[in-house]
Amino acid sequence: MAEVKVTKQNYEKELLQSDIPVLVDLWADWCGPCRMLSPILSEIAAEKEGELKIAKINVDEEPELAAAFQASSIPMLVVMKQGKVTNVSVGYIPKERVLALL
Amino acid sequence: MTSFELIRKAIRYEPVPRPPVAVLDGYNWFLKRNGMTDQDLSAMSEDDAAAFILSQYDRMGSDLTYVGPLASGAVRETLSSITGHRPPFPEPSEAEGMSAEDIFRQASEHPLCTRLAGLLRAMNTRLAGRKPILAFAAGPLTSAAGLMGMETLMTYLTEDPEGMERVLDLCTEITVASLRFQLENGATGISIADPVSAVNLISEEFFARFSLPRIRRIAGEFRSLDIPVMLHICGSSAPRIAPLVGSGINIYSMDDVPLSYAIEQARGDFAIFGNLNTVGVMLSMPPEDVYARARELCLAAPTGFILAPGCDLPPDTPEENVTAMVRAARSLRKPKISLNPDPEIVKTVKEGLKQKGGYCPCRLARTEENKCMCKEFRDQIADPDYEGFCHCMLYYKSYEEE
């Protein structure tokens, strides 16, 4: 539940209108570091159930959303609070640095 | 590869992954950088002082480390207490009948030697063979100048050459005893500083008569130990190089001599150490120019060479310039590019590359610079300071030899 797939259809609800902070993960199937980051994000999602939402955007399936975030490289993590971007990181980072972004 | 191994290879003119890089002593520079004086260093415990000194050589990126001239101070003090003069030999006859062994035995009990021995032991334990620790020795003429005063030395070299031969022989044997003492206590190399043998101070004839045979005696004593034995002569010392072949030194530290000439004159007998001009380059140039000059030297001498300033660093030398010198040496390392050791990542990224027509699967734009191997990683390969993965973690850049 704490991890949701975000598309053009639900981004307003899941990202912009979220009551809790959102950690957006822009990723793709063929991206090695995205795969390494994925289990870390699942762990954080479980640990912060109810406090944080992990929103997954597949950049191949959602190029317009990727463009909206001005993503040029992935994995890209974006922290959003009350619909506003508060932090961005590009590339693989270890768990403690992901937590520090929040 | 440790600094010690790197230096040994350079001395033997074997291929090296990068030129060794060092400063010449550098104490004045790093004490000033830390707002310290010799007295502050002396006030530290031997272990703390060793840790501090070694941290400074690490900070400078130097493959060599040094101890100061404490033994020379102890010898001078001991001789002054014997002769009752300061300096101890106002004329050559004062040295007559003296035994180098007895003098150094007394000097070795001086607090300066006790301190030196403790410092060497602490440095040796901390380094565990990683880098050479060079014992300090003054060359025979420089040693005699310290015991007589420069003017007295120069006068008697002309007026009483036989008497001076005896003084110089005594100085030489004291130096040999002092070096043995330093090696027994943890030094793993030798640095002989001989500024008085400079071309602008003594003639070639005087060098051949008074200096060279005694340098041979000192270096020859330790030749079989397979340790760095470095001789430094200041200034434009080109005429000094060829006569030193076969002397037993294995590193010649020089200042104002063209590197290619020095390498040619050394004939593979000893490595050349130097020779970034301390004032014109190290003190005055912007870091990018220091880097360019240093790299030029490294490229001119692929082995048999240790990159360093031509003499002791001026205390006001900008740290960025020392870093630029070290970066230049490191830029010669050949990077090794390997695949990520995780086969799952490799499989994923390679499949992605196939799907994306050879463009990086972790980048969205299909531009020329994102074609694998991407421009970012090519730049990282060219950057001597970068070690790590490419963005998509398919490749890893490392420097195997370090």
Image (tube, grey):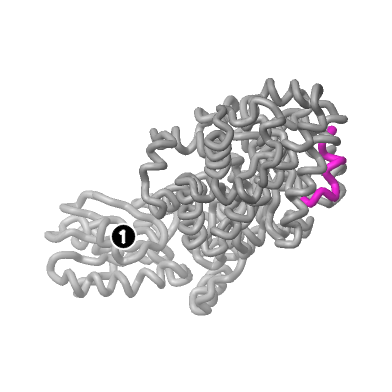
Of B121 and B145, nearer the camera is: B145
Residue at the farthest bottom position:
B343
**Mark 1 residue element:** helix
Q: Quadrant of the C terminus of chain B?
A: bottom right
Place of residue B98 in the rendered image (x, y in percent of width and height, measured from the top left): 67, 42
- Residue B384 in sight here: no
The answer to which image quadrant residue B130 occupies is bottom right
- Position of residue B237 relative to residue B388, above or below, is above
Residue pointed to by mark 1: A97
Of B326 and B288, nearer the camera is: B326
Counting the numbered discs, the total is 1
Image point 72% across, 59% down: which residue?
B9
- Position of residue B261 relative to residue B61, above or below, is above
Q: Is residue A70 left or right of residue B30?
A: left
- Which chain does tag 1 point to? A
Is residue B244 inside the magenta stretch? yes
Name the amino acid type tagged 1: Arg
Image point 38% across, 56% down: which residue?
A66
The answer to which image quadrant residue B152 occupies is top right
Place of residue B45 in the rendered image (x, y in percent of width and height, measured from the top left): 37, 50
Image point 54% across, 68% down: which residue?
B394
Q: Residues within 10 Å of mark 1 (few under 14, many from 20)?
A: few
- Dominant secondary structure (helix, strand or loop) of the stretch shown in magenta: helix
- Position of residue B282 relative to residue A86, above or below, is above
- Residue B256 in sight here: yes
Place of residue B144 in the rendered image (x, y in percent of width and height, measured from the top left): 68, 33
Which range of residues does the magenta coloring cover?
B239-248
Of B168 and B243, nearer the camera is: B168
Is residue B121 inside the magenta stretch? no
Q: Is residue B116 left or right of residue A26?
A: right
